[in-house]
Amino acid sequence: MEYRKLPKGGENIGVIGLGNSSLGPAGEREIEEIVTLAVEQGVNYFDMAAGDAVPFPAYGRAVAGCRDKVYFQVHFGADYRSGQYGWTLRLEDIKRSVDWQLKNLRTDYIDFGFIHCIDEEADWRKFMDGGVLDYILSLKKAGVIRRIGLSSHTPAVVQKVLDTGILDMLMFSINPAYDYRQGEYAIGEVDERMTLYRRCEAEGVGISVMKAFSGGQLLDARTSPFGQALTEYQCIQYALDKPGVLTVLPGIRSKEDLIRILGFFSASPEEKDYAVIGSFAPKDAAGVCVYCNHCQPCPAGLDVGLINKYYDLSRAGDALAKDHYDNLEKKAADCIACGHCDSRCPFQVEQVRRMAEIRTYFGA
């Protein structure tokens, strides 16, 4: 497992966690085995927005002896008391549902208390006006909630919640389809979504990624909006390369799924290379560096993707990005303008010109 640190708080979070939207049909016994194996393999971040109530008691048993080693995303607005998933904005229902979740997870605290599935501005207003946000803030003050998060598919709504300054974590749907306006939750233009990711990183808000495979559609050429299949490893790497992302939360159905997903860490760079998306990305994505590093290796030894990322983050207001750039061994000024990166970039970024621009911006 590899880990990334939450800027606000410092928790080390595994870059692959687990989603539970499809795990219920496996049954409690197998779920308990899956969670136990996941923890043994270093997985420590679990999203509890489940498709039904089945996973909760299984999780409670599986982590009983290692609760301090795992992090739960518990959703305020997801209701499982009927046995199936339900969505609610009613404060009393949310209180009862959260109590039910804590009881079944066998815990008395919540690592990440999430404002659940707010995709419309009207829902955000109801969440505030109905007292749910005040309830979450009171639980954080009391130490029951350690960090506050939001799950959403809508960049404009996320921006409004970010403006409040309360968020430590965002759960957002990141994959090539949604980023390039393909699919049910493809909300926001290419630049709008990238701006959101950069703002999260600039403000120290971590991102946990849902729907990395677009509900499985990207994994099959027959259902892919691009007419071409991607692999799980390509989708995971694509999400991990986005600014602000700490962890990707694939939804699994079995122990075999878990073992295959964790094979990501032993996969070759070629198996993770998603540069093929440059061949079917929309025209307005051309010229935008997505930090994929398909242009590597640089003859002059530059980490082209990282240089671009620090430049973009600095321009987005990240005060630390310049310090990170200054600490690079090779900087834009070391570019020898050989054109190797220009010829290999699947997104037609003119990196030689951009290196000159970055050199002028940072002065090195």
Image: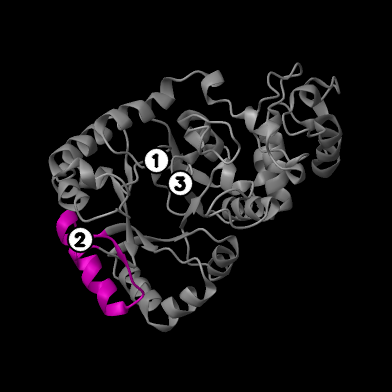
In which quadrant of the rendered view does residue 359 lie?
top right
Q: Position of residue 328 (x, y in %)?
A: 68, 31
Give the quarter of the figure containing the N terminus.
top left
Of all residues, the one furthest to the bottom in this rendering is: 129
Q: Label 1: state its secondary structure.
A: loop
Q: Amino acid at mark 1?
A: Pro
Seen from the viewer's position, the closer of residues 48 and 72 is 48
Q: Position of residue 337 (x, y in %)?
A: 86, 23
Residue that numbered label 2 is attached to: 102
Residue that numbered label 3 is attached to: 211
Q: Position of residue 3 (x, y in %)?
A: 42, 36
Q: Does the magenta-highlighted stretch encompass residue 68?
A: no
Checking the image for residue 250, the label placed there is: 1
At a point 26% along the width and 75% down the height, the residue shown is 93
Q: Label 2: state its secondary structure.
A: helix
Mark earlier in primary sequence (3, 1): 3
Mark earlier in primary sequence (3, 2): 2
Q: In this picture, is 283 found above or below 304?
A: below
Mark 2 residue crowding within 10 angstroms, few (<14) / some (14–19) / many (20+) = some
